[in-house]
Image (spheres, helix red, strand yellow):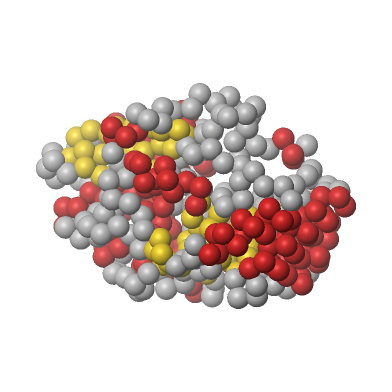
Amino acid sequence: MKITDVKILKMAAESHKTSVGGDTNNWLFVKIYTDDGIYGIGEGSLQYKDQALESEILDFAKFLIDKDPFDIEFIWTSLYRRVTWTGGAVTMSAISAIDLALWDIKAKALDVPVYQLLGGKVREKIPVYANGWFEGLETPQEHANAAKKIIDSGYKCLKFYPFIGKYNIENENIYKGIELVKAVREEVGKNIQIAVDIRARLDFGSALKVLNKLLPYDLAWVEEPIQFDNLEMLDKLSQKTNIPLSTGEQLYNRWDFQKLFENKSVSILQPDICHAGGLSELKKIATAAETHYLSVAPHNSNGPISTVASLHLDMSIPNLYKQEIFVSFLERYKKVLTNNIDIQDGFTSPPEGSGWGTDIDEDALTEFPPSKYTPVDSEPYTEFF
């Protein structure tokens, strides 16, 4: 079997809290064809950078033509090691998209689900947590009502972003955030897990103040309380709190994660299957994390193939914590997937069938033409200044 062609597919992402003025980012898929008539689908969605990502994938495609798609490790290593400039968000997302498509091809050719190629399943169903359930909400009561609704629908763990404001957070925003967390905790009770994502927007002192005030609410974790760049400072912060911390969505390979293993600053790792090297690399990261007694909760603010591929990984790793699901994206997933993701009582599993068990309906993509966003101006990070 040989690779014969590589095609890029794009669609507008579902609008959510990170959109500004209606300009959303895009979800980007790669479709790799073979001379056996089997093709594979991957995703590398890289928020607000899909033009650069598309160019990188199409450049890599020149190398892929006539290669054996079964040689996944050879292709991954070649794309990472045999290039003059390597690493970073664009290159690693391109490698991720290609890697995912190759796993889909191989599993389809062997007529098995992808997770069977990873050693088989270690669980029958995957615990998930809900993100994106709080869109457009302001008051504590609105958050409490929405939390009750999402918990009543079956989810047993939820995450949200109660702290807004600038790098040095004002008392007004600290106390507003605490009131939101308090309202949600009181509404859902003690048995439901709650996580808070600070989105790396605070300085060290502000983060420490917030963590101290969150302690009474028994949080499952706090995500990226400070910016991810300086892991030594994250380590110092972790030593001053009893709340589990998490990070990893902007780390791009096993070597980046090695620093987290060494300083033991977090309890939960959050690699993104679209950005950290695809299924091949996330399996390695998860295995390394297991030797340090760390759990993995794959980051997933991307499109439907990202979610499905993450579920196949989740089926195969013993140290899975939970899988992130943007509930506000699920209706759009349903419209473009040929076999939908089914979530019941806070658990899910990959769609049944060979490969991913599902595909992208290209005709359905026409309903969601790619967004023509403006980099920086359309992005959500004005609060950092």
Q: Is residue 162 visible?
A: yes
Q: Residue at x 49, y 65 (%)?
A: 154
Residue 345 figure quarter: bottom left
| Camera-nearest residue between 356 and 248 | 356
| Camera-nearest residue between 268 and 220 | 220
For residue 189, above or below residue 158? below
Q: Residue at x 41, y 36 (%)?
A: 28
For residue 385, above or below residue 111? above
Which residue is situated farthest in the right direction here? 171
Residue 373 coordinates in the image, percent (x, y): 54, 26
Residue 313 coordinates in the image, percent (x, y): 38, 61
| Camera-nearest residue between 331 and 283 | 331
Q: Is residue 89 left or right of residue 351?
A: right
Residue 172 coordinates in the image, percent (x, y): 86, 50
Q: Is residue 31 left or right of residue 264?
A: left
Q: Is residue 84 visible?
A: no
Residue 332 coordinates in the image, percent (x, y): 42, 42
- Tell how many labels: 0
